[in-house]
Image: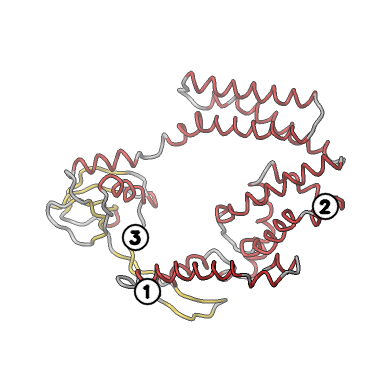
């Protein structure tokens, strides 16, 4: 609607395509909830979904939290889109801004972003992944701005070139000490580190000696690919070495249980999702759910047995359970320990006596 207002073409809102789209949306969503209502509480589902979305919005925070996020969010968002977001400096140029209005697609991107971003900009404790749908639009805009700046010969290009080449040089230097920090590297990992470092230095050298142009930005893409490759080959094995292998743990548990179901033992905890707007409750509901534990077990259990792990608060002799130390009860025989799970607790794989 914002874009139609920007282009002064509101009559397109009443085209048959929009009505077909609205009809499909209502049919799919209504059909889903009609089926869901046969066995579950559809209203509670809707209210809980609203509550989970509302928890990340300005609806449930005070003015100071919102004001602080108004300052922090832009910097975090720009940081996530580096190096492309460096193109924002070109927006201080009046000529670039005028060309945005002359390009319908770029104008649409700007309107789309400005209309939708306030929901996230005013939401304290927002997870940046909630804004990923903006990234393709923003990078498209940034690359267009960069291309247009070279076409118009905007002078700030030299500053951008210096910043990017300096950053790439630091990345190349930073890869070398990693070999001293991480022990037990393989030959392939050493080759990856030093080979990527040399390639980055060579890219910097080529662009330092050549004329900086739009095509030169592909060197940044290549550098980012190299850095990601280094992280995949060297960084991920190092960071994941301290994490439990839930796949193997679950596989071993299933073998021990001889294929019998493994239950998650624990008391149910209550949550009260509510439909409220700026402090006023319109509806409140109570739901009983299992307490938190690592979802990895449930995922691999369902993957290997094609059956969803259930929650129980009763012990049956001969059945198998996963239980946290805070929920431990008599009548359980421990078979294995999974240390330092949620909240630093140990979890146990047990059998009912």
Element under disc 2: helix
Badge 1: few (under 14), some or many (20 or more) residues near its Cα, within 10 Å?
few
User: Which residue is disc 2 drawn over?
Assistant: 99
- CA gap, disc 2 and disc 3: 55 Å
**Eyeballing the image, is 27 above or below 120?**
below
* Residue nearest the viewer, comparing 215 with 222: 215
Q: Position of residue 114 (x, y in %)?
A: 70, 61
Which one is closest to the eye, mark 3 or mark 1? Answer: 1
Give me the residue at 45% from left, 32% from top. Answer: 237
Does 48 sit left or right of 269 as displayed? right
First along the sequence among labels 2 and 3: 2
Residue 291: assigned label: 3
Q: Quadrant of residue 133?
A: bottom right
Asked if labels 1 and 3 touch by Cβ distance under 8 angstroms, the answer is no
Location of mark 1 (residue): 286
Locate the N terminus and report the quarter of the image it occupies: bottom right
> Looking at the image, which residue is at 72% across and 44% down?
143
Say if 161 sits above or below 187 in the image. below
- Residue at coordinates 68% horizontally, 34% vertically from top-left? 220
Classify 10 Å Cα crowding around label 2: few (below 14), some (14-19), many (20 and above).
some
Residue most extreme to the front = 16
């Amino acid at each position: 609607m914002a874009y139609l207002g920007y282009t002064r073409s509101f009559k397109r809102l009443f085209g048959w395509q929009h009505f077909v789209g609205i009809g499909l949306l209502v049919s799919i969503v209504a059909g889903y909830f009609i089926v869901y209502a046969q066995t579950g509480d559809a209203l509670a589902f809707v209210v809980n979904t609203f509550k989970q979305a509302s928890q990340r919005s300005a609806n449930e925070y005070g003015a100071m939290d919102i004001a602080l996020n108004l300052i922090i969010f832009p910097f975090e968002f720009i940081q996530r889109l580096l190096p492309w977001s460096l193109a924002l400096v070109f927006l201080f140029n009046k000529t670039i801004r005028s060309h945005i209005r002359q390009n319908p697609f770029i104008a649409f991107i700007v309107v789309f972003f400005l209309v939708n971003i306030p929901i996230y900009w005013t939401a304290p404790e927002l997870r940046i992944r909630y804004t990923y749908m903006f990234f393709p639009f923003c990078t498209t805009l940034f690359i267009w701005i960069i291309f247009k700046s070279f076409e118009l010969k905007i002078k700030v290009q030299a500053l951008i070139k210096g910043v990017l080449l300096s950053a790439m040089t630091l990345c190349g230097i930073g890869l070398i000490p990693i070999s001293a920090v991480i022990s037990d590297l393989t030959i392939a990992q050493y080759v990856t580190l030093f080979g990527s470092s040399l390639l980055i230095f060579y890219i910097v050298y080529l662009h330092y000696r050549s004329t900086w142009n739009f095509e030169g930005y592909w060197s940044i893409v290549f550098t980012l690919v190299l850095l990601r490759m280094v992280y995949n080959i060297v960084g991920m094995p190092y960071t994941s070495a301290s994490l439990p292998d839930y796949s193997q743990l679950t596989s071993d548990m299933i073998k021990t249980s001889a294929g019998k179901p493994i239950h998650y033992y624990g008391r149910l905890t209550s949550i009260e999702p509510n439909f409220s707007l700026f402090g006023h409750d319109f509806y409140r509901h109570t739901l009983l759910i299992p307490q938190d534990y690592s979802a990895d077990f449930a995922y691999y259990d369902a993957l290997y047995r094609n059956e969803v792990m259930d929650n129980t608060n009763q012990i049956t002799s001969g059945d198998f359970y996963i239980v946290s130390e805070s929920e431990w009860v008599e009548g359980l025989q421990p078979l294995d320990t999974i240390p330092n799970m949620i909240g630093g607790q140990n979890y146990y794989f047990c059998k009912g006596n």
